[in-house]
Image (cartoon, grey):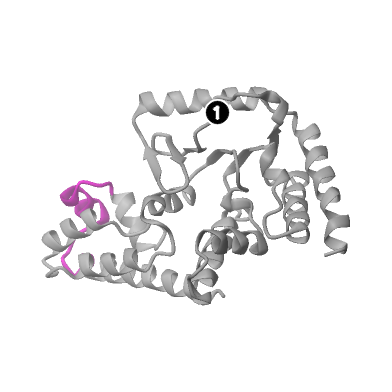
Amino acid sequence: MAKAGSSRQAAWEFYGTELKRRREAAGMTQQGLGQRVFVSGGYIGQFEQAIRKPQIDVAQRIDEVLQTDGFFERMCRKLIHGSPYAEYFRAVAELEALATRICEFAPTVVPGLLQTAAYARAVTVAANPFVPEEYVEEKVTARLERARILTDATRPEYWVTLHENVLRVPVGGPGAMAVQLEHIAALARERTALVTVLPRTAGAHASMDGSLRLMEFEDAPPTAYTETSFSGSLLDDPVVVKRAQRAYDLVRVAALSPEASLALIESAAEDYRPCASTT
């Protein structure tokens, strides 16, 4: 299952190696090339180290400056076409790996960064009932690979608020749901994630039209990402991001404490156990 992710990483590394080789052959520093293509030298360095995903507009300018006859644009398009993520989510997957802090509200489904393989599979199959097994495997693998940022040495702070509905819908069946909730509880106990639950009794809340994610970075402005069933929007307008941050704050204020939330998650997991043993 790791093959798809490994091949994508190898492609990023090849892109970076070629960029460095051709930049040096042209006698240019990272800073010098960055100035010519309107990004920082550090940005070029991230491409060369395979940290940042290649971007088509930058690749086009690199081809023009280094006179590489469209090589980097073609390579970039191949990488993007091979992405396991929906087009509207690709930039988000890239940015979350660079974030220093991620705050997320999930009203209906366990967020991707917290999903187990069985839960991810059930969600994928429910949305795509006629796709081949290879498609499902790629989606599940990509989701599990994303979650690795929570165990990296440079992992971001991860704050997540789940609506109680997320705990009550048995995605994948009682057994899979029990394991999923136990996984979330373990991450909370290990302090890998700060998890809270918005109870049903809270009633109306500030983000009722979809999930919300806020991302903060070391050397870049914060962003917000909103998603509904069939589309998502990555927002960087400071005014809009500030409104999204306020909406998240309001949800957090209405949520249970981390301790009470953990107790509710563990209780819900136990509720699924008797059902799992009889199915």
Residue 209 x %, y %: 49, 33
Does residue 194 appear to the left or right of 8 in the view shown?
Answer: right
Residue 129 x %, y %: 52, 66
**Residue positioned 15% across, 68% down in the render:** 70
Pick the residue in front: 153 or 108.
108
Question: In the rendered image of this protein, does residue 198 appear above or below residue 1?
Answer: above
Q: Amino acid at mark 1?
A: Tyr
Question: In the rendered image of this protein, does residue 79 appear above or below residue 132?
Answer: above
Does residue 175 appear to the left or right of 60 in the view shown?
Answer: right
**Residue positioned 15% across, 66% down in the render:** 26
Residue 272 x %, y %: 82, 52
Give the magenta range: 23-40
Question: In the rendered image of this protein, does residue 7 appear above or below residue 159?
Answer: below
Q: Which residue is mark 1?
A: 248
Does dot 1 land on a helix, a strand or a loop? helix
**Residue positioned 48% across, 71% down in the render:** 131
Q: Is residue 24 magenta?
A: yes
**Residue positioned 69% across, 47% down in the render:** 192
Q: Quadrant of residue 87?
A: bottom left
Prevailing secondary structure class for the magenta stretch in the rendered image:
helix
Q: Quadrant of the N terminus?
A: bottom right
